[in-house]
Amino acid sequence: MHELSLCQSLIAIVTEHARRHGMARVREVCLEVGALSCVEPRALAFCFDAVARDTAAAGASLSLTIVPTEAWCWTCSRTVAVADREGGCPSCGSPTVRANDPRDLKVTEIVGDAVA
């Protein structure tokens, strides 16, 4: 389950951000996840809660937004935006698409409380 290692890296980023910006507690972490990123949202949320224990992000909510991913269709030879794993190419319907950057996972916002 690669979601565990993703969350370990995510918590490192979040706690460093909290330290640099004087946050005593992180309340919410917002992520954009590419539609073809091979990230299972429920597994990511489970791992996030487990890895966040005993950190400034303990109890924080994880907000995920699935975003379309730019992909190459091997059948119609086009670059297309794919919204999910199930649909295939929106142009020709073929399932033979490859994500241009399958590592689409981006922290978009970290919300927290300042040190009193």
Image: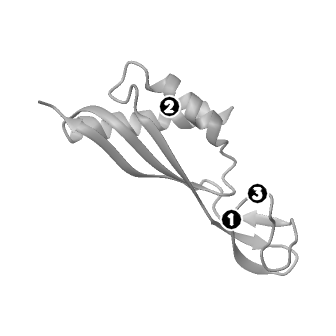
Residue at the spot 81% in from the left edge and 66% down from the top edge: 88
Q: Is residue 44 above or below residue 31?
A: above
Position of residue 80 measured from the top left corner of the image (x, y, whole percent): 70, 76
Quadrant of residue 1 within the rendered picture: top right
Residue at the spot 50% in from the left edge and 27% down from the top edge: 49
Helix, strand or loop under label 2: helix
Q: Check disc 3: other Cα within 10 Å, few if <14, some if 14-19, many if 20+.
A: some
Name, please, the residue furthest toward the top.
54
Q: Is residue 83 above or below residue 32?
A: below
Q: CA distance from mark 2 to mark 3?
A: 25 Å
Depth-wise, is mark 2 or mark 3 nearer the camera?
3
Helix, strand or loop under label 1: loop
Q: Nearer the viewer, residue 3 or 46?
A: 46
Position of residue 40 measured from the top left corner of the image (x, y, whole percent): 67, 42
Q: CA distance from mark 1 to mark 3?
A: 7 Å
Q: Which residue is mark 2?
A: 8
Position of 110 with respect to 8 (left or right) is: left
Q: Check disc 1: other Cα within 10 Å, few if <14, some if 14-19, many if 20+.
A: some
Q: Which residue is mark 1?
A: 83
Q: Nearer the viewer, residue 71 or 85?
A: 85
Depth-wise, is mark 1 or mark 2 nearer the camera?
1
Residue at the spot 37% in from the left edge and 30% down from the top edge: 57
Q: CA distance from mark 1 to mark 2?
A: 27 Å
Position of residue 106 measured from the top left corner of the image (x, y, whole percent): 49, 53
Position of 108 with respect to 74 (left or right) is: left
| Amino acid under disc 3 | Arg
Helix, strand or loop under label 3: loop
| Amino acid under disc 1 | Ala
Quadrant of residue 90 within the rendered picture: bottom right
Position of 65 with respect to 109 (left or right) is: right
Q: Which residue is mark 3?
A: 85
